[in-house]
Image: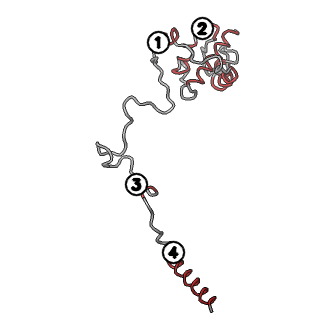
């Protein structure tokens, strides 16, 4: 008789617990804003900011993440200043000739050639003319870095493709090629 009471009590408790479950209406949530945040439209009006707009301009003087400021302007005067004053920040341990050579082969060899003589594949096929040999130019590490950053004549800027550190590695490799010519 006791077992019948126990089974009935257990069965009744199971029915009671399962009857409270409803998939259409989930249980209460604590701090529901943490799970279901308010979605703002980018250009919609909002009282979140003083000017009433949701989309805001970056703060004045702010830089993109990963951007390093370069204090020389894109002009002939900036080129001459960089040529005279700009020195490589790389120390002897961070100068990686293999990586510099690999980057040179990716970005520079098609115009400047494998030895820096200005006879790359695009020059041989006459797609670009007048690419100088490193031997014929008075170049410094500052002038090379400046030209890679801003470009010069028909050479475009490679600042979007190469980080500042990678540009310095290519600069070191170009100076190595110049010394071998």
In this view, which residue lies farthest toward the left? 51
Q: Looking at the image, do the residues carrying marks 4 and 2 touch, with CB atoms under 8 Å apart?
A: no
117 shown above or below 42: above
Kindly identify which numbered label has been placed on residue 21.
Answer: 4
- Residue depth check, mark 3 versus mark 4: number of the one nearer the observer: 4
Q: Nearer the viewer, mark 4 or mark 1?
A: 4
**Mark 3: which secondary structure?**
loop
Seen in the picture, residue 29 relative to 88 is either above or below; the reply is below
Mark 4 vs mark 2: which is more N-terminal? Answer: 4
Query: Is disc 4 surrounded by few (<14), some (14 to 19) or many (20+) residues within 10 Å?
Result: few
Q: CA distance from mark 4 to mark 1?
A: 76 Å
Side of 37 relative to 104 (left or right): left
Q: Residue at x 62, y 89 (%)?
A: 2
- Considering the image in quadrants, where does the N terminus appear? bottom right
Mark 3 / mark 4, whichever is N-terminal? 4
Q: CA distance from mark 4 to mark 2?
A: 81 Å
Give the residue displayed 63% in from the left and 25% down from the top. Answer: 107
Q: Residues within 10 Å of mark 1 (few under 14, many from 20)?
A: few
Question: Tag on residue 120?
Answer: none
- The residue tagged 1 is 76
Task: Say which mark, if any, is on residue 137.
Answer: 2
Image location (x, y in percent) of residue 168: 59, 20
Quadrant in the rendering for residue 167: top right
SS class, disc 2: loop
Crowd around label 2: few <14 · some 14–19 · many ≥20 (10 Å): few
């Amino acid at each position: 008789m006791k077992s019948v009471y126990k089974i009935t009590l257990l069965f009744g408790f199971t029915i009671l617990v399962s009857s409270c479950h409803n998939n259409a209406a989930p249980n209460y949530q604590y701090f529901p804003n943490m799970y279901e945040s308010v979605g703002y439209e980018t250009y919609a009006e909002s009282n979140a900011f003083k000017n009433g707009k949701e989309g805001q301009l970056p703060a004045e003087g702010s830089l993109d993440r990963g951007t390093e400021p370069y204090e020389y302007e894109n002009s002939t005067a900036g080129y001459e200043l960089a040529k005279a004053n700009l020195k490589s920040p790389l120390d002897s341990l961070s100068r990686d000739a293999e990586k510099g050579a690999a980057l040179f082969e990716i970005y520079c060899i098609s115009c400047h050639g494998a030895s820096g003589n200005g006879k790359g594949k695009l020059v041989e096929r006459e797609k670009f003319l007048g690419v100088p040999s490193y031997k014929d130019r008075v170049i410094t590490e500052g002038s090379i870095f400046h030209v890679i950053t801003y470009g010069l004549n028909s050479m475009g800027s490679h600042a979007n493709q190469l980080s500042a550190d990678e540009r310095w590695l290519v600069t070191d490799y170009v100076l190595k090629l110049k010394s071998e010519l």
